[in-house]
Image: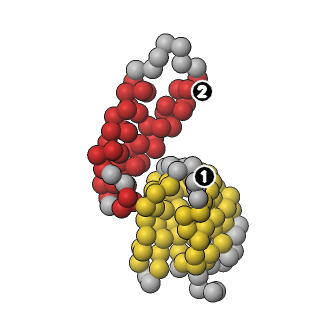
């Protein structure tokens, strides 16, 4: 097991992944970071983007995440994601619709919107943009 790292991806709905892999690349808020066996311990916020799971010297699975947190130890990487789905399961048309709705909400806020709602709309726009990009890259 020394040449692999345990990877777990958990969403509010379920445990999506729990397996030993060669490497995981996580979209951190300060940039993507790769996790290999023996990685230094770290906790990072995860931005909307795609987690690449590596095996057999190549990317074997890509999973879109809407954000969350990652905890890395020398033996394990655990990502707690707010929303997650395999990239191949993203419907490009639905992702585009989500993006249009998010842009509209940001560009045309209601008069009684509070700052928290504005932040939530801006965050939804970032998630929608990342999801469209993930769908385009396949």
Q: Is residue 128 above or below residue 12?
A: above
Q: Residue furthest front?
A: 13
Q: Position of residue 69 (x, y in %)?
A: 63, 54
Answer left or right for 78 relative to 133: right
Q: Position of residue 3 (x, y in %)?
A: 59, 85
Q: Is residue 78 above or below residue 23?
A: above
For image coordinates 40% across by 49% down, the residue present is: 131
**Which badge, 2 or 1, is on the more N-terminal residue?**
1
Instruction: Please state, as top left, top right, bottom left or bottom right, where the N terminus lies in the image.
Output: bottom right
Q: Label 2 crowding class (10 Å Cα cut-off): few <14, some 14-19, many 20+?
A: few
Q: Are marks 2 and 1 in contact (CB under 8 Å)?
A: no
Q: Label 1 crowding class (10 Å Cα cut-off): few <14, some 14-19, many 20+?
A: few
For image coordinates 59% across by 71% down, the residue present is: 18
Asked if residue 19 can be seen in this view, the reply is yes
Report the disc number at residue 116: 2
The alpha-carbon separation of the residues under discs 2 and 1 comes to 22 Å
């Amino acid at each position: 097991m020394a040449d692999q790292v345990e990877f777990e991806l958990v969403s509010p709905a379920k445990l999506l992944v729990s397996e030993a892999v060669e490497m995981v690349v996580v979209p951190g808020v300060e940039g993507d970071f790769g996790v290999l066996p023996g990685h230094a311990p770290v906790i990072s916020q995860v931005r909307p983007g795609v987690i690449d799971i590596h095996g057999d010297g190549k990317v074997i699975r890509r999973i879109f995440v809407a954000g969350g947190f990652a905890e890395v130890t020398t033996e394990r990487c655990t990502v707690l994601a707010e929303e997650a789905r395999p990239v191949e399961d993203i419907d490009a048309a639905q992702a585009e619709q989500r993006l249009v709705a998010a842009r509209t909400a940001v560009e045309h806020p209601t008069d009684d919107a509070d700052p928290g709602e504005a932040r939530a709309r801006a965050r939804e726009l970032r998630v929608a943009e990342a999801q469209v990009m993930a769908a385009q890259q396949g």
